Amino acid sequence: MVECGSEELAMNSESAEAWLLRAQEIVYAALTKAREVRCFPGRWKMIASKLEQIPSRLSDLSSHPFFSKNPLCKEQLQAVVNTANDVISSSELCAGEKYEGKLRTQSDLDALIGRLDLNLRDCGLLIKTGVLGEATVAEASSSSDSDSSASCNIRELLARLQIGHFESKRKALDRLVEVLYEDKKAVLAVLGRGNVAALVQLLTAASPRIHEKAAVIVSSVVESGSGTFENWLVSEGVVPPLIRLLETGSGVGRDKALISLQKLSAAADTARAIVGRGGVRPLVEVCGTNDSVAQIASAGTLRNLSVVPETRRELAEEGVVRAMIDLLDFGNLPGAKEYAAECLRNLTLDDDDESLRSLVISEGGFRSLLAYVDCHSPQEPAVSALGSLVDLIPTEALVSHGFLSHAAHALRSGSLGAKQAAASAICRASASPGMKKMVGEARCFPLLVNLLEAKPQGAREAAAQAISVLITLPHNGREFKKVAKCVPNLVHLLDPAPQNTAKKYAVASLVILSSGRECRRQMIANGAIGYLKKLTETDVPGSKKLLEALERGSFRSLFRSRSMRF
């Protein structure tokens, strides 16, 4: 048996070859002892079977040309020797029936079997990692080859995540976190799938310190933006342990798990996996905390989950609607509020799911969205969410909530996306003559006419559609004609190009306005007849009628002008 204590230093200085001989001898001795034990036959038969496999693994290890150059080899041989020594000790106790209690001995033997499994697995992994071949490169590197040496040292650290007991893995994790802060690119450059799998396994460790450090490294890998790394993590099963860290972790570990989930949830399949694994409820609970970092990351993750249509019903059932409304009402961080607005926008996208939109309204979401739009520079998500809800709210309630003033504010001061969403919301809300009249009186027409000049096709289309609906009311038609450039801007939307989806709404509006002589004159002056001749070829509704009206007007004008000459 190998002695410890005063001889430990001398033993550590021995070469790998010396440790190989020691391991071969002690394994042979342990195997002989194991075969002689008669009690607990099943367990001792398993121990003997595993000891029989070790010599071939040691042979594979020692046959590598750089066997003696890497400290991992000697450490692995020391681990084998220690395990074999313990096998001999246990066999002597069992053979002499000096063991203390049957259950305790069975537990000790099971632990020995586990250590033998670990020794066998680690020997195989040590060959597979490729670290042995890189050791001599690191030793031979000069100061000018510091990058090569560093990458070899990083590979060794990564290999240690897969080999040995938890304490050695913890030390490797600690050092790897330090290296990540020093040179993240160097770590990512040598990271392989096996290393990713080892990190995922360490997330499940019983030790909080280990799974916290593993979470730090995983989040750093995820934040690198590499799709390959993300795919490896997900396929190696990273989602369940990250969710467990949300439920049981705290501090850095939980925050890093949230950051990882937020990034990974951008992929639809991963979003489904998070929902399917029960990740929604812990995310909702984190939204209710006062931890700003955690709150933003959890809200961002829920926003990503809400993008996937089939997850929305379960999100609602787990209380996401209430959580997002609370963030709008009481959240202190603009980022969390933005994610909340985006999540509510996504949850209300489906017009066919009236129950989900009604839930948002019943929870006070419409009022909260209006307040958010009023207090901030209006952005598209919140305004779009409002637009999805307006057709379920009575006109009197829209008026009492001040919907039109908020929509006008978005049209005036919002982002371009918010302006487009506001135009769509106004159009959707204007189902009744009374609401149409109030929109006209809210001075929205100049803002809509300006939006007709926007570069994005969607913005022009939304404005044109809203105008075509609103001016069906005669009072609004008269008010609309007073807006500068109203007719020229509509005529320019008659462009027959296929990508111009606003032309049908422009035609509908111009048909209504063509009853006025001055409007017809402006249409003709801005080239409407040329556009309409092309539109009639593609059967755009109303284009033929409008063309005939303008041509008649043009003929009358020509006739009058000639009469005046004579």
Image (tube, grey):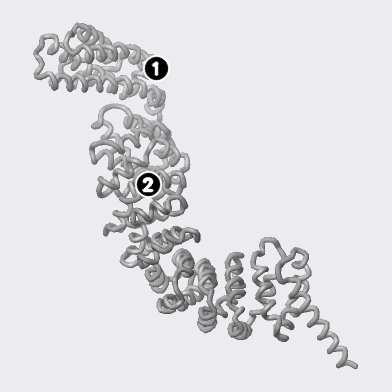
Label drawn at residue 64: 1
Q: Which residue shows up at 37% across the image and 60% down it? A: 321
Decide if residue 182 is on the left or right side of residue 426: left
Residue 35: horizontal and vertical position, in percent? 22, 7
Tag 1: amino acid: His
Specify the quadrant of the image occupied by residue 31.
top left
Q: Which residue shows up at 32% across the image and 43% down it? A: 215
Label 1 to label 2: alpha-carbon separation: 38 Å
Q: Nearer the viewer, residue 360 or 294?
A: 360
What residue is pinned by disc 2?
260
Q: Which residue shows up at 33% across the image and 34% down it? A: 201
> Which quarter of the rendering shows the C terminus?
bottom right
Tag 2: amino acid: Ser
Label drawn at residue 443: none
Q: Secondary structure at mark 2?
A: helix
Specify the quadrant of the image occupied by residue 372.
bottom left
Residue 20, can we see it? no
Decide if residue 459 is on the left or right side of residue 344: right
Residue density around tag 1, few if under 14, some if 14–19, many if 20 or more, within 10 Å? few
Is 188 located above or below residue 5 in the figure? below
Specify the quadrant of the image occupied by residue 157.
top left
Is 359 located above or below residue 451 in the figure? above
Residue 205: horizontal and vertical position, in percent? 27, 36
Q: Earlier in the sequence, mark 1 or mark 2?
A: 1
